[in-house]
Image: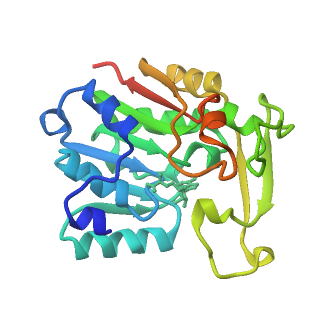
Amino acid sequence: MRLLRSGKSNLHPIERQNFSRLGALSEWCDRAIHLQCASGYDTLSLLLEGAKDVVGVDISEVHIQNAQWTSAQLEMPAQWFCCDLLDTPSELNETADLVYTGQGAINWIHDIEAWAGVVARLLCPGGVLSLLDDHPASWLFSQDSEALEASGINYFSHAETNRGWSPEYIGDLGKPRDQHAIKHERVWTIAQVVQALLKAGLQLEYLGEHPDEYWSAFPKLSEADKSRIPMTFSIIARKPA
Ligand SMILES: C[S@@+](CC[C@H](N)C(=O)[O-])C[C@H]1O[C@@H](n2cnc3c(N)ncnc32)[C@H](O)[C@@H]1O
């Protein structure tokens, strides 16, 4: 909030670098739709990056209430929708020059083709998707280890259901772990994500694999070890004009 108040964008340097391939947002982005916007800091950052109008979509009522509060406090107008992204209202169809998502998003999606279909229906012809998210290969390593150790998961078909959050990820929620909500997440391989986007009719313009993190997923690992594995990947994909 302090960052936004001072007029600074919260976006990751990789996202900003990817945008720089497309020219200034102020020149081409009349509307950006942020899927899985959480409390909207990155959504509002898109205004600072040059988008003229921003829309945030998230399934969490608490996140959307926070987002509404923040945009009102900062006098940064935005539209917020509280729904499953698969149910994003049809009034938004083909209105986005940019669909922006990631930073802990697609692991919560359980039907990647349906997700890609929503991205495609929201984009205007010629509009682009920007995605930066955890690299699926990073799941192959144990997050609690001080050296690179196999987590033992199956890269090609991993889904998990558990309770509790890593404090590195979401901070101290103030409740014992056994009282946290149950969460369901899964790994989508790079191929599954790209194939879903291609099947939805998008064209891949950029695919990057990066050692850079956006959160401290491996708090005990040395920087040297972290630099040896792909932590994140990013995509720019376009709906044909
Ligand atoms: C880790 S957060 C993403 C944070 C985001 N990168 C940001 O701007 O801060 C994941 C978000 O996905 C949302 N979410 C999970 N499943 C969803 C769904 N099916 N539809 C919409 N939002 C969903 C959660 O409520 C949560 O806010």
Which quarter of the image is occupied by the N terminus? Answer: bottom left
Q: Please say which color scheme the image uses.
A: rainbow
Which quarter of the image is occupied by the C terminus? Answer: top left
Q: Position of residue 154 (x, y in %)?
A: 83, 33
Q: Of 109 and 50, which appears nearest the observer?
A: 50
Q: Position of residue 167 (x, y in %)?
A: 64, 66
Q: Position of residue 73 (x, y in %)?
A: 24, 76
> Residue most toward the left?
27
Residue 16 sits above or below residue 47 on the image: above
Q: Does residue 201 appear in the picture of this structure?
A: no
Residue at x-position 65% and y-position 42%: 222
Residue at x-position 47% and y-position 59%: 58
In this image, 94 relative to 159: left or right?
left
Q: Position of residue 89 (x, y in %)?
A: 40, 52
Residue at x-position 25% and y-position 61%: 78
Q: Quarter of the image holding residue 126?
A: top left
Residue 216 sits above or below residue 228 on the image: below
Residue at x-position 79% and y-position 38%: 158
